[in-house]
Image (spheres, grey):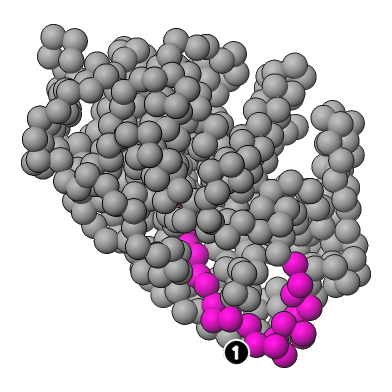
Amino acid sequence: MYDPLLSPGPGVGEPYPDSYWADTAGPAPEDEGQLNTVIDTDVVIIGGGYTGLSAAYHLAKNHHIEAVVLEANKTGWGCSGRNGGFALKAAGRLSYQKMISRYGDKVAHAMFDEMFEGLDRLRSLIKTEKIDCDQQSDGHLWVAHKSRMMNVIESEAEFLRKQFNYDVDILSADDLKQQHFISNEAKGALRFRDGFGIHPLKLVYGYHEMFRKLGGKIYSASPVVQWDKVSGKHLLHTPQGLVRANRVICATNGYTAPKLHEGLRNRTFPVLSNVIVTRPLTTSELEETGFQSSDVITDTRTLRFYYRKLPDNRILIGGRSAVTGADACNEKHNQNLINALVKKFAPLANINYEYKWGGWVCVTFDDIPHIYHDEKDSSVVYGMGYGGSGVSYSLQAGVRLAQKMAGIHTDLPMCNSPLPRFPFAPFRRVGQRGLYHYYHARDERSVVIT
């Protein structure tokens, strides 16, 4: 599997992974094919996923700025087409409590509103543009996997009400059984009234079509293999072509090649997440699990599992897995997900999966995304680092990137500060292995390890 820390690039025209999303999304939308000539443009966007296509669309629609998109493989080939389809009120991994302690009340409230705006924008865009992406009803369950985690849930609920005037519902284990599903592991839950499930590849196909309807051009099988700057012009070489541009947007997120641009080196950390999808549950399995909910679900583990019932009654479950790309296809990671699913739902003891795949989540050192410019060259702008919460916020990031190109400033930490470099970057994965062992032990014990 492509490893962003070790591989020279993500390939050229690689097929989609053998995922449930690729199998059910329908044919990929038309594009311009591989770039095989020399073109000039004001803005070139590297990456044909949520962020890049959102930036391209909003540049054209809101600011009338010309842009072209270069995609190494196919639209949504990276995490935009591999994620679990969880549209949440989130951006990055920084908790709301830490937002307040780091930035203060005023800025933290502005960041909270920014996340809300991203989710609302996504909901509105799906409706107004009639994007057929299997949108499910609103609801996000944060399920306590141990009894002690109910204290954490109750504290979080009180915090959200007091600090942000944001109301949530606390559900008991019995509430979950009556309204959502039957699981011996679930001791209760905090239910957010916002957040919903979607088909992620169909969503990115929708963005693709929106941009092309405005006259935008998307070149697939066209990775950037060399990047020069001569006389103020960026020269982006692809295997068969060349783009000359005044400005560049990097929207490669967790799939950023290590030598794409010096300004991005060691500023993100790609972390693998595996996903499996089961066969459709039988009528008796649905009855025994009581699985009536279409809410998206996460649990209270630090190494959390995320899962949901899909519209065709299959169960999707995902979680952290391998540390390196070389180990990504190890069957034990998929078996770990099956084991986790059975632990949650005992009646599914004999179930197996029909689809398996993985993708790279982009983590930043300060746990927030960044939409900013290169510190040495303001004509290079990037948007990345969603930490597993990119389905909704990547759309908002594209809006902010377009505004930056139009000279509009946004006074938020994610929009006015650069991606910090990781200290001791060559040893990131050594630390990751150690943390995984520690977090697993802490998550699964009945008492808290301090």
Q: Quadrant of the N terminus?
A: bottom left
Question: Disc 1 marks which amino acid?
Answer: Asn
Magenta region: 269-293
Residue sitting at x 10%, y 30%: 38
Q: Is residue 290 left or right of residue 99?
A: right
Q: Nearer the viewer, residue 145 or 376?
A: 376
Q: Is residue 209 left or right of residue 238?
A: right
Res 294 quadrant in image: bottom right
Q: Is residue 304 above or below residue 112?
A: below
Residue 362 place in picture, x, y as percent: 45, 42
Residue 269 place in picture, x, y as percent: 42, 40
Q: Is residue 247 left or right of residue 355?
A: left
Residue sitting at x 63%, y 64%: 307
Residue sitting at x 44%, y 10%: 407
**Judging from the image, what secondary structure is the residue with disc 1 in?**
loop
Is 91 in the magenta?
no
Is residue 243 visible in the rendered image? The answer is yes
Is 288 in the magenta?
yes
10 Å crowding of disc 1: few (<14), some (14-19), many (20+): few
**Would you name the residue on which mark 1 appears?**
350
Q: Is residue 337 above or below residue 230?
A: below
